[in-house]
Image (tube, helix red, strand yellow):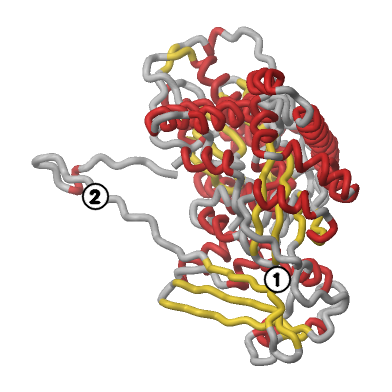
Amino acid sequence: MSKLSIASLLVLLACVSAPVYAVGKVTADPNAGRRESAGETAASADVAQKVTYEARRKTVVSILADLSEMTGVKLIAGYSSKDWQVRDRRMNIFAKDIPLASLMNSIARVMKFSWSKSEDDKTVSYRLFMDRNELLGAERQRYIEEQRLNQRQVDARQRLLSGLQKAAGMSETELEELKTSSPYVYLMAAQGWADILPRLFAESPAAKQAWISGEQLAIDIGSVSADVKSLLMKVLLIQNVPETASLLINTMRTEGGNQGNIDHIGDIGVGVPGHSSRCGFTDPDSEYGRLVGSSTLAMMEARTQEEMRATAKQFLDQRAQAQISDTTDLGEPLTEHPDDPTLSVKVKMEMKGDLFSDALAAVASCSSFAVVSDSFAGKYNGLSFPHDETELRAVLDKLGSTCHYNWERHDSTLEFRDRDWFRKRAAQIPDAWLEGWRKAYKDKGFLEISELSQIASLTPEQIWFNILTDDVLGYVCNYLPSSREFLMAYAGLSTKQRDLIFTAKGLRMSSLSDSQWPAMQALLRGSASPSETGDGLSLVGARTQVGRKVSYVFQVITSAGEATGAKWDVRCPRYDAPPKEKPKDNKPGESEAQKPKQASN
């Protein structure tokens, strides 16, 4: 497990219609038969019928299947059954007694999809798909936004480095002023980074280039001077650094990605295979960075436990708003809304949970509007509303700013779309993968290393938006940071190669293919027996299971059976089913059959 700097550790401890169909036009579908215009489709009696429907974080294919069964109208998701990028996208819908055509319009608008209508042997069907031009536009948006975010973080790293360089030459009076003007820079300087970074980067231009660009790098610790090595040991709380250790640059960024915390700009650490000690850095000029700096300094200066707890509580209370402020300019611009008297109505939000879908359900319940949204994540920090009646417009604006959503009113429907949908869409994975992992996790009571390595091989963004937010698999993320690099290399091995690992002689490194060797070579960097080809080295492993507790130990040995120092411990996550809700007692004189029934879709 990675250690953090003293100041960062203190903070962590304290945290103890319109016509069918939307998107402008009906676009040609290569799978469709004879088609009618949007206006003709909207006038059809089949989609004029009214529906009442609710869906929470449900896939598009499931939603259309439900609506088809309810209405008798054939609704198809995607170009084909393999079009998981349409079929597996998730939505929230809370609609009561609205025309099916209106709901179909909203689904298309929110999801940036299109509808086509076709007739075959008197059977009318409607197909929902993503137009190729819309797809290209989304990819273009994503590329531009990624470039902008990367440049934003490059600028932040340069500002932090510049600030630390200046802090190194400041007088005591100037440092006191820095504590107020830039508390995060002061904090990092006080920890010793004002001495380390300038000297480290002067000695290793490659380390500086990697740091500024945001690229991951691992180099021999022997490439830096003894003084810099000593300073790193002090700041990272390391008692000794083996000669085989590596200097690590931006390796934490592969575990969270920009999507996880936009204010995380990089990290520096020291490690040997399987173990590392690293310090993460934050944008010093961001609201979150300033909050981390000022709160940590206040806790370090606190004289009593009560003062420390009060500061920690203040940090927790302000953290969500700081992170919201730092992401205001990300993604699509905020939609401007003209005055709308229909949104001036007073409502009382009664949320039954802390999910985004719970908030949308409350909006639909306390107003006369249907609500339709896309769905990429579940919980949002700071998502709460006054207990008193509040203007609906204020509620919608709060939802938009807190959850990073744009919203629009179309007749009697409120539509929400994630402002970063084009990046999150690209991070989507097939629902079949998730369902397979969920089933294995529940059936066995744990995830085996084969499944865990598959998850570890996902991109940081895919992990963040698919695994971390999953009700069943979210806990698995706790097991990835300490062993992700090894698991990624393990995932690239064949079944036969994996079996060899658990034999006495192990898997010979020299037998790895050209595509497999680079991942293993990166793992071996810093071992006592470095090798450019893997000659004379083997990977051996042992599996231990006690009940549902499963763990592995892997190490690299020489041809003589001697350990090289390269060792990895992998623990497999154990599944614990959520506690069952206790049945509510019947009211006096009320039988089970007399209880009111709740409609469900």
* Residue 76 seen in the current view: no
Going by the numbered disc 2, the residue's amino acid type is: Pro
In the picture provided, is 373 more to the left or to the right than 347? right
Q: Amino acid at mark 1?
A: Ala
Q: Position of residue 499 (x, y in %)?
A: 66, 86
Circles 1 and 2 in contact, beta carbons < 8 Å: no
Count of numbered labels shown in the rendering? 2
Residue 71: % across, % down: 53, 43
* Looking at the image, residue 589 lies above or below residue 362: below
Q: Tell me which residue sits at (65%, 67%) in the image.
A: 453
At 56% from the left and 48% from the top, the residue drawn is 469
Crowd around label 1: few <14 · some 14–19 · many ≥20 (10 Å): many
Q: Which mark is residue 375?
A: none
Screen quadrant of the N terminus: bottom right
Given residues 120 and 178, the one toward you in this image is: 178
Q: In the image, which disc is placed on residue 491?
A: 1
Tell me, for residue 583, which label it has, or none.
2
Q: Is residue 69 visible?
A: yes
419 lies left or right of 589: right
